[in-house]
Image (cartoon, rainbow, N blue to C red):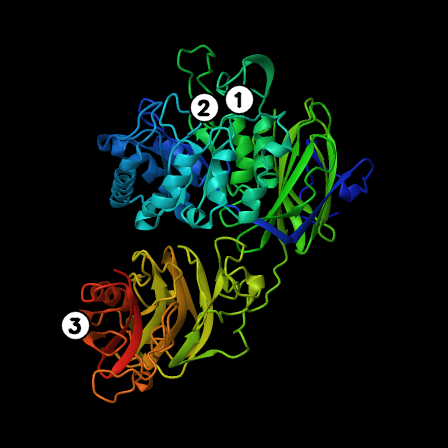
Amino acid sequence: MFGNKFLKLGVACALASAFGISANASTVNVNVGEEHQVIRGFGGMVHNQWQGGGGLSEADAKIAFGTGDGTLGLNTLRIPVYASSNDFNKEVQAAKWAKKYAGDDFILYATPWTSPYAGANQHMASSNYQKYVDHLNSFNDYMKNQGVPLYAISISNEPDWCGEWACWSADEIYNFTKGYADKMRKNGAKVISTESFAYQKKLYDNVLNDANALKNWDILGAHFYASDAKTADSWFQYSLADQKKVERWMTEHYTESQGSGNYWRTVMRTGDQANASKVDTVRAMDVGYEIHRAMVVGNFNQYTWWYIRRCYGLIMEKDFGNKLQIPSNEIGKISKRGYILSQFARFIRPGAIRVGATAKPEDHVFASAYKSKDGDSTIVVLVNRDYGKSKTVTVNVQGADVQSFHVYTTSEAKNAKYEGEVEAKNGSVTITMESGATNKDCIVTLVGVGKQIVIPQEPFGGNAWAIPGKIQAEDFDVSGSGKDENGNSNISYYDNDSENHGNSDYRKDTGVDIYEKKFGKVIGYNQAGEWLEYTVDVKKAGDYTMFAYVASSNGTASFQMFMDNKAITDSIVVPKTVTATEGDFEEFGKVQRNVTLTAGKHVMKFLVTGDWMDVDYFTFVEGKDATDPEPDTTATTTPEKGEENPGENPGENPGENPAAIAPVQFQAVSASAEFGIYDMSGAFLGSVTAQNKVELRSKAASVVERSGVYMVKSAGRVTNLSVVK
């Protein structure tokens, strides 16, 4: 019927569409054009101090962080920040093994439980907040020096379950976040909020309602311990976080700690720190249901289980005390809970986007859908929690050319079993979940494969950018589809999320964060891993000097340039150009590099390697160490906010009209120059040497008596400068 290419599914997951079976089938409509959150991935925890040093072996890491058959597909590892620096080394080896097998998808993040400034059941004094930040940053530095840098670091674990660790009230969380959390971004690490054990919204509301505080969080972290399979969907929802477009990570949970991770449906006395002890049915499928609700109902970007290796975890371990008498042949192998999580983690890889899908096609059946990072695959996950009843489901994919699906099933009898490849008719397929099994509940992942439609990416506006010449950052290429003959994607940009954080309507449909400045449009909110591509036409082979007009408030942001995916520069650090009192990124400076280019058309890539910078444009000038012909557009005679135009006030020489003099050019951030400081009546106050406007503003404060607007002159040029004493 399908030729040799397609396999008929076995009895456990029978193909219905081939035989015209449609009776009693529910329908899942998938719309890949309806985009929701970006998925960062799936992970687990290692805490060697609490696990007696047996948190993760290399063999465990290979199973946990691999992506092939018999692996979990995790990409994220959570580790503790210990109160003592003597313990900082406890998770280094586990992190290195995890990184080895996760590769480029690896994410490492850390959470503090206590610190030298607050132990169990203690609140930290505000006078120790900076010391606490220093403690966290010292751990950050330590992990970077060990070759496993942190992607993110949390403020604190479970502020609302603090009998065993440090306590934080909602007000304390707010005050620390607003005044200190941004200082935790050492080495480009992202800041995770305090992680409520019960996802208590009241602990997050104050920060979410204050834009100045919220900008110091990158991720909202939460635990699901106040929930179980009977908890209402409303518990997972957080409309305020949706409105503020806050990224959310589920950073810790386990559904039952008293039993084995291999229990499918076992009646036993259950209960954990959030739920009272009771006789209950332990359902492995509840893990799949919880992940579904985290993604679909809660809009979470990431899901982290508690211990990777534990008797109730993802990889089996004997229980301490041997009460459960875990069979020796189960130890060190993936548990049922692990296989269920793998139905998401192995196939929904970091950078995938959740797309529109019928979330509940019928009672006890749940669905979610995702498109891969490069857009060439559509993944649908079906969860059947109706024990003893098979379910027939028709999946219709709209907006993607899906020709077939690879099918994987985990049930009581199967462990992420590959069921074969089935043909899709016009993007549609009908399957029956566990039709021949005694127990019908299961989780099925459909990985859609489509015929590649190749549309080359094109220069914005139709013409390649000429080199030598100037390239505006916001005019990156228009994306195509599929891959070129060299296997390169025809996508022209990558943004870490699909939301547009900018304030401009220019190319708003791309999700790239474009901002309007007084001197034009820039690309802002740049985070490590994001990139933009531009088709360029190099008129003449040879040496060039590249200038980039950029801004940063942290001095650690960085980027790298490529031609046809080959590096033409090192990673270029962007010096701090934005003052603490002017955090709106209105002040830019220039960095430069010598590059060698070949003639002809190429694709130039701008890759962000360090968080939080803005970029306005790139200029290529012939020759090494060439002079940049472009002026610094932020240093003009246009008055800054709150400054007055000097008008006809005299300058350094009698009769001089300052407004008629060309503006001071703050170009190369590496070049120093001497500047004269004058009051607005033209009186000379003193001179300073500075290499950029930020340094100039700081040094000017030492020669003026009070805050205000002053004139600055250098080499016959003048501008206005607001100085704060």
The amino acid type, in three-letter code, at marker 1 is: Asn
Q: Earlier in the sequence, mark 2 or mark 3?
A: 2
As drawn, 387 above or below 128: above
Q: Give residue 543's position: percent from left, percent from top.
A: 29, 78
Nearest the eye: 512 or 346: 512
Secondary structure of residue under mark 3: strand
**Given this view, does label 3 or label 1 mark the residue nearer the observer?**
3
Q: Is residue 313 visible?
A: yes
Q: Which residue is mark 3?
A: 686
Residue 533 sits above or below residue 60 on the image: below
Q: How far apart are the alpha carbons under marks 2 and 1? A: 8 Å
Q: Is residue 329 above or below residue 148?
A: above
Which tag, 3 or 1, sits closer to the chain's start? 1
Residue 633 on image: x %, y %: 37, 75
Residue 119 vs residue 330: left or right?
A: left
Q: Are discs 2 and 1 less than 8 Å apart at CB? A: yes
**Residue type at tag 3:** Gly
Report how far apart the C-alphas of labels 3 and 1 lie in the structure.
77 Å
Instruction: Report which residue position mark 1 lands on.
Output: 262
Q: CA distance from mark 2 to mark 3?
A: 72 Å
